[in-house]
Amino acid sequence: QVQLVESGGGLVQAGGSLRLSCAASGRTFSSYVMGWFRQAPGKEREFVARIYWSTSYADSVKGRFTISRDNAKNTVYLQMNSLKPEDTAVYYCAAQITSTRFNYWGQGTQVTVSS
């Protein structure tokens, strides 16, 4: 069983930055596709970014957010710059392991951006 633990959420003013971290268990982390998703109040969970050997982003965060990973530390990061109030959500780390979909999820970390 793979466990994912997010950290780094908090309250920030619009235009500010935060970096989220997600520590994963497991001995083959480098083989995991990792992703970040978010869910705002009253809305469905949505894709934010993913990384394996390449990266991809939702249009809403492209140019502002950067996903990266450190395989030696079993950790994936989400650097969020130029934050907007509409980025307010619970952010979830996810792993896609021997599956065609993300099948492991963290508990989520709250990000609140004030205007």
Image (cartoon, helix red, strand yellow):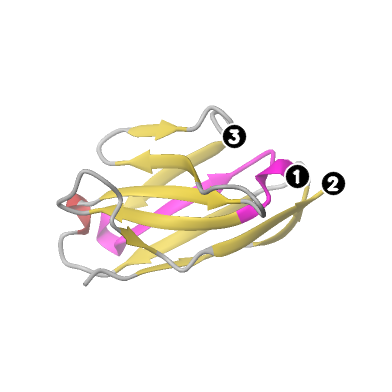
Is there any visible trace of residue 33 in the rendered image?
A: yes
Front-most of residues 68 and 92: 92
Instruction: Give the magenta part as a residue range.
Output: 71-89
Task: Using the numbered discs, state the Cα–Cα distance from disc 3 to disc 2 in whole angstroms.
Answer: 17 Å
Mark 1 Cα-neighbour bin, 10 Å: few <14, some 14–19, many ≥20: some
Q: Which mark is residue 115?
A: 2
Checking the image for residue 64, the label placed there is 3
| Position of 105 relative to 85 (above/below) | below
Residue at image x 31%, y 63%? 73
Local secondary structure at mark 1: helix
Q: In this figure, which residue is indicated by the disc labeled 1?
A: 85
Magenta span contains residue 105 = no
Q: Residue at x 61, y 48 (%)?
A: 43
Task: Pick whichever of labels 3 and 2 is earlier in the sequence.
Answer: 3
Q: Is residue 71 left or right of residue 18?
A: left
**Within the magenta stretch, is there residue 81?**
yes
Closest to the observer: 10 or 38? 38
Question: Which mark is in front, 1 or 3?
Answer: 1
Are the residues tagged 2 and 1 within 8 Å (C-beta)? yes
- Disc 3 is placed on an element classified as loop
Sequence-wise first label, 2 or 1: 1
Which residue of the protein is positioned furthest toward the right in this rendering? 115
Comparing 62 with 71, the one in front is 62
Residue 8: tell me if it is visible.
Answer: no
Which type of secondary structure does the marked residue at label 2 adopt?
loop
| In the image: residue 46, left or right of residue 96 | right
Callout 1 amino acid: Pro
Q: Are marks 1 and 3 in contact (CB under 8 Å)?
A: no
